[in-house]
Image (cartoon, coloured by chain):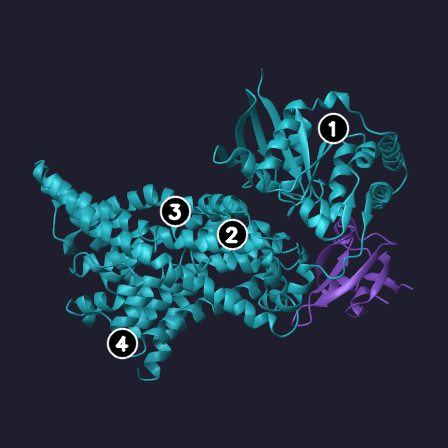
Chain colours: A purple, B cyan
Amino acid sequence: MTLKDGKTGMTLKIVQIEESPLKQRLMSMGLIPGTKVTVLRSAPLGDPIAIGIRSYNLALRREDAERITVETVG
Amino acid sequence: MATLAVALTGNPNTGKSTIFNELTGARQKIGNWPGVTVDKKVGYTRYMDRAISIVDLPGTYSVNARSPEEKIVIDYLLNTKLDLVVDVVDSSNIERNLFLTVQLLEQDIPLLIDLNMQDDAARRGVEIDTAKLEEAFGMPVVETVGRSSKSTKKLLDVFTSTVMENYEPSQLVKDHIAKVHAIRASEKTDAQKDEEIIEARYALIDKVVAKAVTFRNVGATRSEKMDRFLANGILALPIFLLILYAVFQITFTWIGQPIADALEDLINDDFLNLAKDGLEAAGVADWMVSLVTDGIIAGVGAVLTFVPLIFVLFFCLSFLDGTGYMARIAFIMDPIMRRCGLTGKGIMPLMMGFGCGVPSIMGARALDSEKDRMISILVTPFLTCGAKLPIMALFAAMFFPHNAANVVFAMYIIGMAMAIIVAKVLGSTLFKAKGSTFLLELPPYRMPDMKSVLLETWDKGKGYLVKAGTIIFVASVLLWVMSNYNFSGPCEIEDSILASIGSWMSKLFVFQGFATWEAGAAVLSGIMAKETVVATIGVLYGAGDVSTEAEDAADTASTMLQTGMASAFTSLSAFSFMVFSQLYTPCVTALGTIKKEAGGWKWVAFSAVYMFVIAWFVSLVVYQVGRALGF
């Protein structure tokens, strides 16, 4: 599954990030394979989504979240 | 002893600028880094007989030299002789903050790590063992809580007593650097190397955090709870509109406007009469009295009365930014902004555009991609800025007395609609190839530091004072000379240079229904500053000094109705003139800002011409269609 499919409240583990110009920025912001993220909420109109990662909150668009492969934890 | 040279670096939202403001107070200078439009903030202070200079570097998440800010930070740190580099870290968010720390240590830059926001960290259950952190990095660590005199004193103590030569990177850091060198030397693509290095940095951070930090589960934080309302669910949008409404009420009704009115009375009555009496008593020539009073004081005064509105608006926006709510606005508005060809982060600069295009164009810096930035810069001037409002208010009151508010509102809509259309078109033509992204930290809600809010307000607003003193001053003198003289000497206004240029200009507007020399001259003066359009019309139709304030429009309109203006326009041609004024070429101050921000005269020429052409066509269509429909 990808991060885009994550439902609010789910904790997920990043498996891989698809190649894109955004990849290095996402990684610099702490989205490294193996890192756990929590899906916090989506904006009132469904997009973007907010995730909790490495004790801070980050907003990203669903189309970018789709490039991040994740697996459920636990 | 020599001045102690200190540089502050760190991520955005770490309270770095608050620390800078607390340390230096008002003793700071804001300039520009050479070649770019990023603010360079330098401040000074004294402590224990030691002079200290402090540079506040732009907040960045990394130093990959991808953005101008990142390039500035790393170039400055590598090429300047500094006694101390302070890395300000948000303790509640230490993992991601340490990414920059590690990157700087890789570059052999010794750091004093300032664990700021200790109070936030405690609330969020983050406990950091400073001794262990010092040991892990081999660098000195100090704890602060941001806005407190105790923290400020502590920092100054540490600044003056720390000798960076006594510290050297730990074995852990040295091993990491060796690893980075090994990756760099390996046979892989640059992208692969960069990614591996990023992973290595976080691997190091994970090790350090495991040693020095403990996380207690404290449940949902205060920010989480607030976000359930402010950034979630259907309530978030009306709450945003309510806050937006409050900002405009504060600016245009409750606080800003009353101050502006008082200032206007002061300038236009007391000061003007004082100057007039003084000059006449001193026996100054009549033309000189007229130049000073009708020209300079009236012209510059019109802009000065506008300054309180701008300051109040910027205060509100800086305050909201300081609370962290601005990031939420970007978050909830992104889907809407995106459908308009813009980005959620662009909402703040655009909102400023209703006050004035200049800070709005500068505010576009904050946007991630060049595409978003350029589009935002190029469409912002379509919005109804505070200087266009009086034009709309006057014409609406004169020619649409029963529907004035609706007509003015229609102009706001036309401006916004045109901004959206052009953003869409630019996005799919000129800037098609470039991508747009949205990656935004949602910082915890905080009570903003008032000193920082005030300093930021002053920093953004002082541009108007400069504008009043320079461009408007020159424009007022020029306008006065052009309307009182022709090439053979003093003359009546109908024979003046302004009338000649105006009648030449007016030939352009035959199909728009306002081909009078007065309208032509008003359009021309509006390129110098939109504030002067109403003033020019007032002078040209012989009404003398008219108020340029939007809320006096009804009075001004009744004065103006007695003049030739009433017969010079029909309702339709007045509407067409309003549409043209709403959309045409930005004022020279805005154009100057576009040159700086978009980088080059080419964009200035582009803005000036394409907006004029669009305004020309739209007002033509409005007039011709209106006539065909029998208005």
Compared with residue B626, is residue B455 higher up or lower down, i.e. above or below? above
Q: Which residue is mark 3?
A: B464
The reply to whether dot 1 and dot 4 touch (C-beta < 8 Å) is no
Upstream in the sequence, badge 1 or badge 2?
1
Q: Dot 4 falls on which chain?
A: B
Tell me the kind of residue under disc 1. Answer: Pro
Of residues B539 and B105, the one drawn nearer to the viewer in this rendering: B105
B431 left or right, relative to B524: right
Mark earlier in primary sequence (1, 3): 1
Q: Which mark is residue B318?
A: 2
Task: Tell me the crowding category of disc 4: few under 14, some 14 to 19, or many 20 or more residues within 10 angstroms, Cα based.
Answer: some
Whether residue B18 is visible here, answered yes or no, is yes
Q: Which mark is residue B401?
A: 4
Residue B70, image x and y in percent?
66, 40
Residue B357 position, x and y percent, is 45, 54
Q: Relative to the observer, which residue lies in front, B126 or B37?
A: B126
Q: Secondary structure at mark 2?
A: helix
Q: Which residue is at 45% across, 51% downward?
A: B358
Q: Which residue is mark 1?
A: B110
The front one of B382 and B451 is B451
